[in-house]
Amino acid sequence: MKIAIGSDHAGIDLKKELVSLLGEMKIECLDLGTNGPQSVDYPDFGERVSRDVSEGKVDRGILICGTGIGMSIVANKIPNIRASLCNDLFTAKMSRLHNDANVLVIGGRIVGRDLAKEIVRTWLSTEFEGGRHSNRLNKIKLIEERFIKHGL
């Protein structure tokens, strides 16, 4: 599995911890920035990671900003992205089990380091359940395609 990860300045410390965790888990990690404490615009990094997931360059993505809200909004603007803001273990599990989320978003100012690591472990180890959830994801895909086709 190959993961792209990105953050803004508010998520950089947590991103470093998660890059280390992914290395320990023997998961290939593509760090798309930011890499310094200076203020940056989260949409730049949310788009980079989400685009790599959407285009199949990586299997999944992880994004971190202060609350996770901004990154979630950005990621879900990209076709084929199902980004889920998960600040607890239950939502991490359900985002994969029912929604087949391909981008995990965490609030770096909301979630502590140890919990964030458990969220990532849970999210990476939970498989999509399929079944009735596949039908729902197909409906979401149709909505996305309608908006792309009509330029809305």
Image (tube, helix red, strand yellow):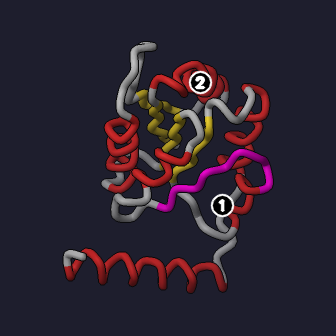
Camera-side residue of 74 and 15: 74
Residue 84: within the magenta?
yes
State left or right for residue 52 relative to residue 124. Answer: left
Within 10 Å of disc 2 (Cα), the crowding (few <14, some 14-19, many 20+) is few
State left or right for residue 5 relative to residue 45. Answer: right
- Give, as a three-letter code, the residue at label 1: Ser
Give the residue displayed 46% in from the left and 49% down from the top.
59
Tell me the magenta residue range: 82-90
Q: CA distance from mark 2 to mark 1?
A: 23 Å
Q: Can you give x and y, in whole percent of width and height, for residue 40 in the image?
A: 36, 26
Query: Which quarter shows the C terminus?
Result: bottom left
Camera-side residue of 103 and 23: 103
Look at mark 2 in the image and give the residue it sits on. 23
Question: Is the residue 41 above or below the residue 77 in the image?
Answer: above
Mark carried by residue 32: none
Describe the element under mark 2 as helix, strand or loop: helix
Mark carried by residue 95: 1
Question: Is the residue 140 above or below the residue 116 in the image?
Answer: below
Residue 49: within the magenta?
no
Q: Can you give x and y, in whole percent of width and height, for residue 99 in the image?
A: 61, 68
Describe the element under mark 1 as helix, strand or loop: helix
Quarter assignment of residue 151: bottom left
Q: Can you give x and y, in whole percent of width and height, for residue 141 in the image?
A: 42, 77
Within 10 Å of disc 1 (Cα), the crowding (few <14, some 14-19, many 20+) is many
State left or right for residue 1 relative to residue 17. Answer: left
Quarter assignment of residue 101: bottom right
State left or right for residue 78 relative to residue 118. Answer: left
Q: Decide: marks 2, 1 in contact (CB < 8 A)?
A: no
Give the residue displayed 35% in from the left and 53% down from the top.
56
